Image (spheres, grey):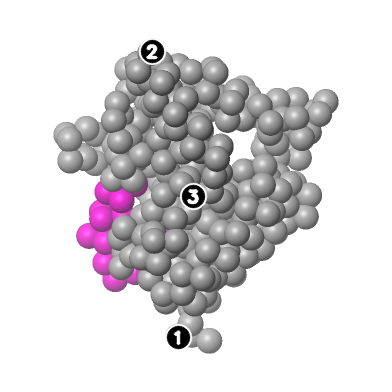
């Protein structure tokens, strides 16, 4: 593994890691979720490396080693959601340059799934396959009012204000579904994995007022039919979620995402829901099943069937 930095358009340095496979057959770029970091994916990355997949993974702005000046959960004062997309796509551009002869796969989890989905819309020719994990559908009126409240709080407190109110508004309902199991039980049935998350200083932090507005923008823009229609029609897409994942509205939202891309004309859209599994299916009790489903999807190409 090598730790590296890439310069973004504004001159900022973005930290990322490359995990090379010995018998390299394709390249995978992973976009992690909100309030976590790239190092949490090392078990999954080791699995992919074993089967010939070199992995690139960055910490998103405001996360992990890219939390500048101790500002966790902060993208940028304005249009941070576009900045997060730019940061992610900078890695894809680097992959095209360094690994031009190999298939290019992108995997996004949770917040990273929305960033990934928008990259698929804005830069459709850059990807051969996509795995979308722990995603969700438009929040409708909740997002409408969420935008208003977030903008008011940015105006009152500033964009980098650590906003517990917005955090509670966004996530308090998640833990209520799993009463008596703890506030982070919605992440996984594997209590040891939840405990690791809770004991990690770079996980589970409260984000800034502007971040919550950016998150709404990511979700809503990822779920517009206009953006879905920009995705390559011949892209192979695998959508995975736990049936008990609140981000996916306990399966309902995930099915709507599947329908969105099928309605947009993407020909190869597959969806699998894991009964009883929660949000972080890569850290779930059935994670070996999830790993193998992803591997099987990556291994098969239309021209090889």
From this viewpoint, which residue is outermost toward the top?
157
Q: Nearer the viewer, mark 2 or mark 1?
A: 2
CA separation in Å, label 2 and label 1: 55 Å
**Mark 3 neighbour density, 10 Å: few (under 14) some (14–19) many (20 or more):** many
Name the image quarter holding residue 189.
Answer: top right
Q: Quadrant of residue 141?
A: top right
Q: Secondary structure at mark 1?
A: helix
| Image location (x, y in percent) of residue 144 | 49, 37
Say which of 66 and 208 sits in front. Answer: 208
> Is residue 82 found left or right of 304 in the rendered image?
left
Q: Which mark is residue 303?
A: 1
What's the magenta region?
88-106
Tell me which numbered mark, 2 or 1, is placed earlier along the sequence: 2
277 sits left or right of 301 in the view: right
Q: Which residue is mark 2?
A: 157
The answer to whether residue 226 of the structure is visible from this angle is yes
Query: Which of the two discs, 3 and 2, labels the residue nearer the N terminus?
Result: 3
Q: Residue at x 39, y 61 (%)?
A: 226
- Residue 161 in percent (x, y) is at 40, 16
Q: CA distance from mark 3 to mark 2?
A: 29 Å
């Amino acid at each position: 593994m090598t730790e590296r930095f890439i310069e973004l358009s504004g001159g900022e340095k973005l930290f990322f890691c490359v995990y090379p496979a010995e018998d390299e057959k394709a390249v995978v770029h992973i976009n992690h979720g909100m309030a976590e970091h790239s190092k949490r994916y090392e078990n999954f990355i080791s699995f992919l490396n074993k089967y010939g997949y070199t992995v690139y993974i960055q910490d998103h702005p405001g996360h992990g080693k890219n939390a500048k000046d101790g500002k966790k959960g902060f993208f940028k004062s304005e249009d941070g959601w576009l900045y997060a997309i730019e940061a992610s796509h900078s890695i894809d551009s680097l992959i095209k340059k360094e690994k031009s002869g190999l298939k290019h796969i992108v995997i996004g989890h949770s917040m990273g799934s929305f960033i990934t989905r928008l990259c698929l819309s804005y830069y459709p020719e850059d990807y051969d396959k996509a795995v979308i994990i722990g995603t969700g559908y438009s929040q409708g009126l909740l997002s409408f009012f969420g935008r208003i409240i977030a903008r008011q709080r940015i105006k009152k407190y500033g964009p980098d204000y650590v906003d517990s109110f917005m955090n509670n508004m966004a996530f308090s309902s998640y833990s209520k579904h799993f009463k008596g199991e703890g506030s982070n039980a919605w992440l996984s049935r594997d209590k040891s994995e939840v405990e690791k998350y809770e004991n990690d200083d770079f996980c589970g932090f409260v984000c800034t007022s502007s971040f919550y507005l950016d998150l709404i923008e990511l979700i809503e823009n990822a779920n517009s039919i206009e953006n879905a229609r920009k995705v390559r029609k011949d892209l192979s897409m695998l959508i995975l979620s736990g049936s008990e994942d609140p981000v996916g509205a306990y399966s309902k939202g995930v099915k709507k995402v599947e329908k969105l891309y099928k309605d947009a004309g993407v020909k190869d859209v597959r969806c699998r829901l894991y009964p009883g599994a929660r949000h972080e299916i890569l850290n779930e009790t059935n994670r070996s099943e999830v790993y193998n489903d992803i591997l099987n999807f990556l291994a098969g190409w239309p021209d090889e069937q």
